[in-house]
Image (cartoon, helix red, strand yellow):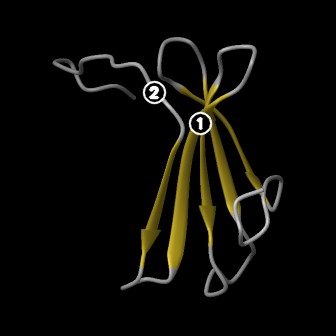
Amino acid sequence: MLKPNAQTLKIKEQVVNDAVTDLMLIFRVTPSGEARLHLIGTNLPFGNRDFQFDENGELAGTGTGLCCGRDGS
């Protein structure tokens, strides 16, 4: 669900390493234009998490361990 006053922005690939939680957050856009968020970390009990968003910014799908290794590749 998007908030009523939500604004859009262009996502460029961003990698955020959060030392406090030992998580790596990777924001990227696929060649087809889908936005993705990857949560990567050794302390995730069910594995790495992937979130896919459609062109309107709505959550389109989630998955476990579909993306990258710890190094983000």
Q: Secondary structure at mark 1?
A: strand
Residue density around tag 2, few if under 14, some if 14–19, many if 20 or more, within 10 Å: few
Residue name at image x 81 percent, y 62 percent: 65
Quick one: quadrant of the N terminus? Answer: top left
Quick one: quadrant of the C terminus? Answer: bottom right
Of the two numbered discs 1 and 2 on the same chain, state the one appearing first in sequence.
2
- Horizontal side of 5 relative to 49 (left or right) equals left
Q: Amino acid at mark 1?
A: Arg
- In the depicted structure, whether residue 52 falls above or below residue 32: below
Where does the image place residue 64, in percent across and percent down from the top left?
Answer: 77, 60
Residue name at image x 43 percent, y 83 percent: 21
Viewer-proximal residue, 9 or 47? 9
Q: Amino acid at mark 2?
A: Ile
Question: Mark 1 sits on what residue?
Answer: 28
Q: Secondary structure at mark 2?
A: loop
Where does the image place residue 17, in percent across and percent down from the top left?
Answer: 46, 69
Viewer-proximal residue, 1 or 34? 34
Extreme-left residue of the structure: 5
Residue density around tag 1, few if under 14, some if 14–19, many if 20 or more, within 10 Å: some
- CA gap between label 1 and label 2 equals 7 Å
Residue name at image x 41 percent, y 19 percent: 10
Viewer-proximal residue, 47 or 2? 47
Where does the image place residue 13, in percent across and percent down from the top left?
Answer: 54, 37
- Horizontal side of 63 relative to 52 (left or right) equals right
* Residue 42 occupies quadrant: bottom right
In the picture, the disc for residue 11 is: 2
Residue name at image x 25 percent, y 26 percent: 3
Mark 2 and mark 1 in contact (Cβ < 8 Å)? yes
Where does the image place residue 59, in percent across and percent down from the top left?
Answer: 56, 31
- In the depicted structure, whether residue 19 falls above or below residue 54: below
- In the depicted structure, whether residue 8 falls above or below residue 13: above
- Horizontal side of 59 relative to 17 (left or right) equals right
